[in-house]
Amino acid sequence: MDAPNVPNDGAGRPATERARKNNDAGAPSVFSPEQEKQARRAVVSSYVGTSLEWYDFFLFGTTASIVFAPLFFGGDDPALQTIQSFLAFGVGFIGRPLGALVFGHFGDRLGRKGILVLTIILMGAASTLIGVLPTFQTAGIVAPILLTILRFVQGIAAGGEWGGATLMAVESAPAHKRGFYGAVVQLGSPTGTLLSTLVVAGVVGLTGPAFLEWGWRIPYLISILLVAVGVWLRLRVSETIDYRAAEADGGTQEKVPFLRLVAESPGRLIVGICAYLMNNAGFFLLTTFMISYVTATLGLEATVILTAISWGAVAQLVITTIIGRISDRFTPSRMLIIGYAVSVVTAFPIFWLVDSRQALGIGTAMFLALGLGSISYAALGTTLTQLFPVRLRYSGIALSANIAGIVAGFMPALAAWILGLTGGSSTGPALLLLAVALISLVGSIIARRLILADQRALSES
């Protein structure tokens, strides 16, 4: 693919300088034993910390329709209760851009490490408090208000997590392993999904009818223990190589990184948002909404879809690892395009398989949704890292992910509303999924052209 000509960056710096800072120039390909140790420690802490934080965030989605709808929202209309629960779920995504702004600002100015410790503590505290909330029967309208506030706090924490963790791993890696290290961080999402789904399914099995009485609180209360592990790991890592190098030449000291980002690279921010959309909005349509669709519309037991999602998450772990290895050879941006093309092709077949009402069909659907869907997810973090300069990178990728997250947060409610309009037919939600996949496919194509343009400008300088 031919790359377009690269103009001046709009801030008085030549395009070659922007290209150099976007494409990890200066990152060593050969590390000393101590540098290798620090790089491994950085990627492990990023993966484990992200897994634990996404466990907390995804746990809300897993329990939204089966716990919060009947226990925290009054009335006698199950469909309305489910939509209200999904709206509370969506509030977390309103908080995510705020978290991206705040944590991105300080992450670009002060470094990645300290911010990542704060995000995991904030997420764990909010999740643990959810586990002790009174229900609607006990506290009335206060119950859903408190639940929504804590969900908003979860969103703020998540807004700073993914971008910082991705940068901690990628910016600490040798140049020829950055695709793989970026993919390892992406394993945190399926690990968190798998962990939250298995814990809920296990607690449902152990507590039986008591699950809606008190059993649902257990997955939230154990968050405090998981957070302690994540904090310990993150305190042991050093600041990233890229950040320290950029700090040495004064390149990270923007007073307000967000304003510089909007002034200097608004197009790249829009491209980043579009490129991230499917892996955010599509994911929650295929998990949170799908749990409700299978249980409420198709009338199947919750364990059927929870088991299928668990197997899908296992496939996601395997395929993400494989694609991470491949992407260092074929480039992450190319793998991102391939992944979104697959998502476009599989949008309708996923719902056709779920509509079979057979466990095998639903399991296959989740393999297509989460397993093959991870082709794009594996390459996403490193691609977005290459899209933005170091001094604006935390803000750039965090805002890309979390502005897209605003749409993602309300995707289950939107899909449920469309499902009602179509009389319970899956055609409406499938069309919604297809539209999201197409937007991300276009975004990924443009992102690759920008990255290639930067690389060509660098090679010609």
Image (cartoon, helix red, strand yellow):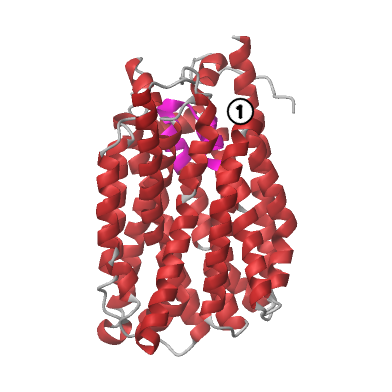
Residue 389, compared with residue 47, is above or below; it is above
Element type where label 1 sits in the image: helix
Residue 358: tell me if it is visible.
yes
Q: Type of residue at label 1?
A: Ile
Q: Magenta part of the protein: which range?
A: 380-398
Q: Quadrant of residue 355?
A: bottom right
Relative image position of residue 122 (x, y in whole percent) = 28, 54
| Residue sitting at x 46%, y 43% | 399
Q: Which residue is mark 1?
A: 451
Q: What secondary structure is the magenta-colored segment mainly?
A: helix
Quadrant in the picture for the C terminus = top right
Relative image position of residue 171 (x, y in whole percent) = 43, 30
| Residue sitting at x 24%, y 53% | 228
Which is nearer the eye, 206 or 412?
A: 206
Local packing at callout 1 (Cα closer than 10 Å; few below 14, some 14-19, many 20+) is: many
Residue 368 horizontal side relative to residue 124, left or right: right
Does the magenta segment cover residue 399? no
Q: Quadrant of residue 210?
A: bottom left
Residue 189, compared with residue 129, is above or below; it is above
| Residue sitting at x 46%, y 31% | 261
Relative image position of residue 226 (x, y in whole percent) = 30, 58
Residue 199 horizontal side relative to residue 377, left or right: left
| Residue sitting at x 48%, y 33% | 262
